[in-house]
Amino acid sequence: MNPRGNPHTLAQARRRTSLDKRQRALTALTTLEQQGKKITHTAVARTAGVSTWLTYTEGIREHIEAAQQRQHPTTPRPPAPAAPPPRCAQNSSSPGRRSGP
């Protein structure tokens, strides 16, 4: 090996390692989903043996969020009932009314 290292070879190795970690994260996500376990970034990271930082990166985060959506789909809430109109106070001490002559 070259005493100064070969940057091209090092870059290739780093790329392979990165791709391997990403694939492990996606595989872990699929496994957790199939097992019916709660999908979290931490759970995916622990199952895959990768950092939680990786689970928030582009290309992984979207898959986790989609799995979370499938696990707990949000249904549109029905509209809230209309609030009753405010009551008007028929009080002689209310502002705008004069009391006395």
Image: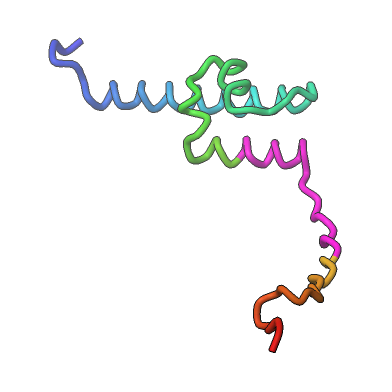
- Give the magenta-colored segment's residue range: 63-81
Q: Is residue 96 left or right of residue 88?
A: left
Q: At which x and y percent is residue 75? A: 81, 51
Please name the colour scheme applied to the rendered image: rainbow
The image quadrant of residue 45 is top right
Q: Quadrant of the C terminus?
A: bottom right
Q: Is residue 82 above or below residue 70?
A: below
Q: Residue at x 64, y 22 (%)?
A: 28
Residue 68 vs residue 8, the one in the foreground? 68
Residue 95 vs residue 63, the one in the foreground? 95
Q: Is residue 76 left or right of residue 39?
A: right
Say whether residue 8 is magenta.
no
Q: Is residue 44 above or below residue 69?
A: above
The image quadrant of residue 48 is top right
Q: Residue at x 85, y 58 (%)?
A: 78
Q: Quadrant of the N terminus?
A: top left
Residue 98 vs residue 16, the one in the foreground? 98
Q: Is residue 92 left or right of residue 50?
A: right
Residue located farthest toward the left when viewing the structure as drawn: 4
Residue 52 vs residue 35, the one in the foreground? 52
Q: Is residue 44 left or right of residue 55?
A: right
Task: Count all numbered tags in the image, as a single digit.
Answer: 0
Q: Is residue 21 above or below residue 68?
A: above
Residue located farthest toward the front when viewing the structure as drawn: 101
Q: Residue at x 19, y 16 (%)?
A: 5
Q: At which x and y percent is residue 80? A: 82, 60
Q: Residue at x 52, y 28 (%)?
A: 22
Q: At which x and y percent is residue 97? A: 69, 83
